[in-house]
Image (spheres, helix red, strand yellow):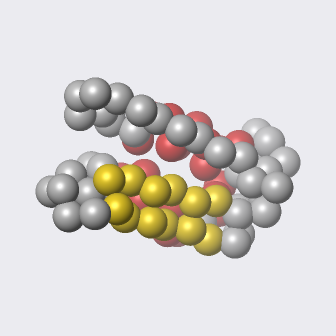
């Protein structure tokens, strides 16, 4: 089973540090290699962004790209 991360804030919050830690646990520092997902409210208020993959986050190009985004 994949590991989950939840962030809730009443002000704009940078999730990159927390997401980077989660991705390392997905195959490097933890055994959570069954996949990963991230849902985020669009900063422009246009809905929700959803990213997911069935491979380990630690070795995912998509997870690395998402970690660099300003979500």
Q: How many marks?
A: 0
Residue extending farthest bottom? 54
Judge whether 36 appears above or below 15 on screen. below
- At horizontal 45% and vertical 66% (from top left) the residue drawn is 50
Q: Residue furthest top?
A: 10
Determine the residue positioned at 70% across, 63% down. 35
Residue at 28% in and 63% down: 47
Q: Residue 9 falls in which quadrant of the image?
A: top left
Res. 21 visible in picture: yes
Nearest to the observer: residue 7 or residue 64:
7
In this rendering, position of residue 55 left or right of residue 70: right
Where residue 1 sits: x, y (%)? 82, 55
Relative height, residue 19 to residue 63 (above, below): above
Query: In the image, 70: left or right of 65?
Result: left
Q: Name the residue: 41% across, 41% down.
A: 16
Q: Quadrant of residue 55?
A: bottom right
Question: Does residue 65 show up?
Answer: no
Measuring from the top left, give residue 15's x and y in whole percent: 40, 39
Q: Where is residue 36, by image quadrant? A: bottom right
Left or right, 69 with reference to 63: left
Q: Nearer the viewer, residue 50 or 24?
A: 50
Residue 30 position within the rendered picture, expressed as x and y whole percent measured from the top left = 80, 42
Q: Is residue 65 above or below residue 22?
A: below
């Amino acid at each position: 089973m994949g590991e989950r991360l939840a962030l809730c804030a009443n002000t704009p919050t940078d999730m990159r540090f927390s997401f980077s830690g989660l991705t390392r646990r997905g195959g490097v520092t933890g055994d959570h290699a069954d996949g990963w997902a991230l849902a985020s409210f669009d900063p422009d208020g246009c809905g929700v962004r959803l990213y997911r993959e069935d491979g380990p986050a630690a070795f995912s190009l998509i997870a690395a790209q998402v970690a660099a985004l300003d979500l």
